[in-house]
């Protein structure tokens, strides 16, 4: 375990335990170590330790080599307009390892009556800055196109309360836009149901557009103009990855922590309670699998909310109930490698999303080696097919063989994929995607208010303010700064 700061042993070092070794926990550890390193040698000392139940750090992030394929079992890229993950990469010396999406292939496809068709150019999840591509798209009927064209005439919503994504889209753009395009696009990100997903928690810029401009068309056009006028300094693509996969970020983070933060892997935390001794300054008692126990001044729970809920039950029953109330969905990613000459479709996009109304058994298919070069050998393509989610949870219960058969049938029907794949890999993400249902922001605010009343405790992860890699990095960093602020160093 590392001591940072003064070597004067007359003062007991402050200790923080970070429980959870995903990117949120790693980010928290890096930030705490950086803050501790900046304290003068005459100041207090610190001990920072990260504990993870798995033998592998990274949580859902995992990159593996299968022959000449580079396979991501979890996320395969991150967005840069939320800067936290990009900034972490730069801090860790990964600037030369960043790779943007392949410019040869752009856009996405959506299934319409069993066939893939292009998503209209410039369409951004809930709307478009340009009417032309939408009017000429085969996705929508002419009544639906007329309804969309009239969107600027729809009155602003007077209520300031949260509403579902589905309610917002129906109100402003019409039911067909929701069913045919928004549901599969949003479902592909959150593996959720737009009927219950919170607009404010998932896509807050769209209600902000409505309030400011009175129209999504106007707001998106204004945003496109502002973006084109603000290009200065270093520019990265909207989505980036790392040459060797996102595991490179985990490896760089672990290397950064070497000598600064002790890391225990393969040890589960089984209990957490407040030390009940007024003569002791330690705040928390932590029990590990195997019978070992630790004490700490601060604890960061970088865990799924439902796991954190079980650990805080003896500390604060109300907080435990609040955390347990955050719902989760499961999904499965079936990754497969194929010969290009055995696929009828040209795969001239980054991927394919599937509306629920098409009654297919997959959520989406990512053309992984179209998005990112060198993910598959020459003449081959790497596909990542997503199954399950909030709308088809029963499919996650299938065995690997049944999932492989299901995906093979769907790929043949949708893309004309034939032949025997070079490999098939099944990656399960059980209760891994938090569902930001209507009212989520208020629930999270209540959770953080409750946590603030427990000195030395912080929470981090994808359950609170966002599900992407940048959101997790920011969450871990914020948790570290909350602990540090409580120490009043």
Image (cartoon, rainbow, N blue to C red):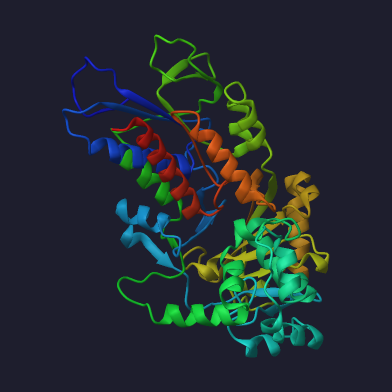
Residue 282 to residue 189: above or below: above
Residue 252: x %, y % from top left: 35, 47
Identify the residue at horizontal 55%, vertical 53% (top origin). Answer: 466
Judging depth in this view, the residue of 339 and 71 nearest the camera is 71
Residue 409 at what x, y percent from top left?
78, 63
Q: Quadrant of residue 194?
A: bottom right
Residue found at the very far front of the displayed protein: 158
Measured from the top left, where is residue 426 in percent x and y?
A: 65, 49
Depth check: give the residue in front, 489 or 146: 489
Side (left or right) of 76 relative to 50 = right
Q: Viewed as shown, does residue 373 lie left or right of 124?
A: left
The image quadrant of residue 355 is bottom right
Say above or below: 169 vs 11.
below
In the rendered image, is residue 236 in sight? yes
Where does the image place residue 476, in percent across and percent down from the top left?
44, 43
As drawn, 285 above or below 76: above
Measuring 31% from the left and 42% from the top, which residue is drawn there?
Answer: 256
Q: Which residue is drawn at 40% across and 18% down?
A: 282
**Relative to the observer, which residue lies in front, 474 or 69?**
474
- Residue at 69 percent across and 39 percent down: it is 325
The quarter of the displayed image where residue 89 is located: bottom left
Q: Is residue 153 left or right of residue 248?
A: right
Horizontal side of 295 relative to 387 (left or right) equals left
Quarter of the image for the C terminus: give it: top left
Quadrant location, the N terminus? top left
Q: How many marks?
A: 0
In the rendered view, would you say 175 is above or below 21?
below
Residue 422 visible in the snapshot: no
Residue closest to the eye, 476 or 150? 150
């Amino acid at each position: 375990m590392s001591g940072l700061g003064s070597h004067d042993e007359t003062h007991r070092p402050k200790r923080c335990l970070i429980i959870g070794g995903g990117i949120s926990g790693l980010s928290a550890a890096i930030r705490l170590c950086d803050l501790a390193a900046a304290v003068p040698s005459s100041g207090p000392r610190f001990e920072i330790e990260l504990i993870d139940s798995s033998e592998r750090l990274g949580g859902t992030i995992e990159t593996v080599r299968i022959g000449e394929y580079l396979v991501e079992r979890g996320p395969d890229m991150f967005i840069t307009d939320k800067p936290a993950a990009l900034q972490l990469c730069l801090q860790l010396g990964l600037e030369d390892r960043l790779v943007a999406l392949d410019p040869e292939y752009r856009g996405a496809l959506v299934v319409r009556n069993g066939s893939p068709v292009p998503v209209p150019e410039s369409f951004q999840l809930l709307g478009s800055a340009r009417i032309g591509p939408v009017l000429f798209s085969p996705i929508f009927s002419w009544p639906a196109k007329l309804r969309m064209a009239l969107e600027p005439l729809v009155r602003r919503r007077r209520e300031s309360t949260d509403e579902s994504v589905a309610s917002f889209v129906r109100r402003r753009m019409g039911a067909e836009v929701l069913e045919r395009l928004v549901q599969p696009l949003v479902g592909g990100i959150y593996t959720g149901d737009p009927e219950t997903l919170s607009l404010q928690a998932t896509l807050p810029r769209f209600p902000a557009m409505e309030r400011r401009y009175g129209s999504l068309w106007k707001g998106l056009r204004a945003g496109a103009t502002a973006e084109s006028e603000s290009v200065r300094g270093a520019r990265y693509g909207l989505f980036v990855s790392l040459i060797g996969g996102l595991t490179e970020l985990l490896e760089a983070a672990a290397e950064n922590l070497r000598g600064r933060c002790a890391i225990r892997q393969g040890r589960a935390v089984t209990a957490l309670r407040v030390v009940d001794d007024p003569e002791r300054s330690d705040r928390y008692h932590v029990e590990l699998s195997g019978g070992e126990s630790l004490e700490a001044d601060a604890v960061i729970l970088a865990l799924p909310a439902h796991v954190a809920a079980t650990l805080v039950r003896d500390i604060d029953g109300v907080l435990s109930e609040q955390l347990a109330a955050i719902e989760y969905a499961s999904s499965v990613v079936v990754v497969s490698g194929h010969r290009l000459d055995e696929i009828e479709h040209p795969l001239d996009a980054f991927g394919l999303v599937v509306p629920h109304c098409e009654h297919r058994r997959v959520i989406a298919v990512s053309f992984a080696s179209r998005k990112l070069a060198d993910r598959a050998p020459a003449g081959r393509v790497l596909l990542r097919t997503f199954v399950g989610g909030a709308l088809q949870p029963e499919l996650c219960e299938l065995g690997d063989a049944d999932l492989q058969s299901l995906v093979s049938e769907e790929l043949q029907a949708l893309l004309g994929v034939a032949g025997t794949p070079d490999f098939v890999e099944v990656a399960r993400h059980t209760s891994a995607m938090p569902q930001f249902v209507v009212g989520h922001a208020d629930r999270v605010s209540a959770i953080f208010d409750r946590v603030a009343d427990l000195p030395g405790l912080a929470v981090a992860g994808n359950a609170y303010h966002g599900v992407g890699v940048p959101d997790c990095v920011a969450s871990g960093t914020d948790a570290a700064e909350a602990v540090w602020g409580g120490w009043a160093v």
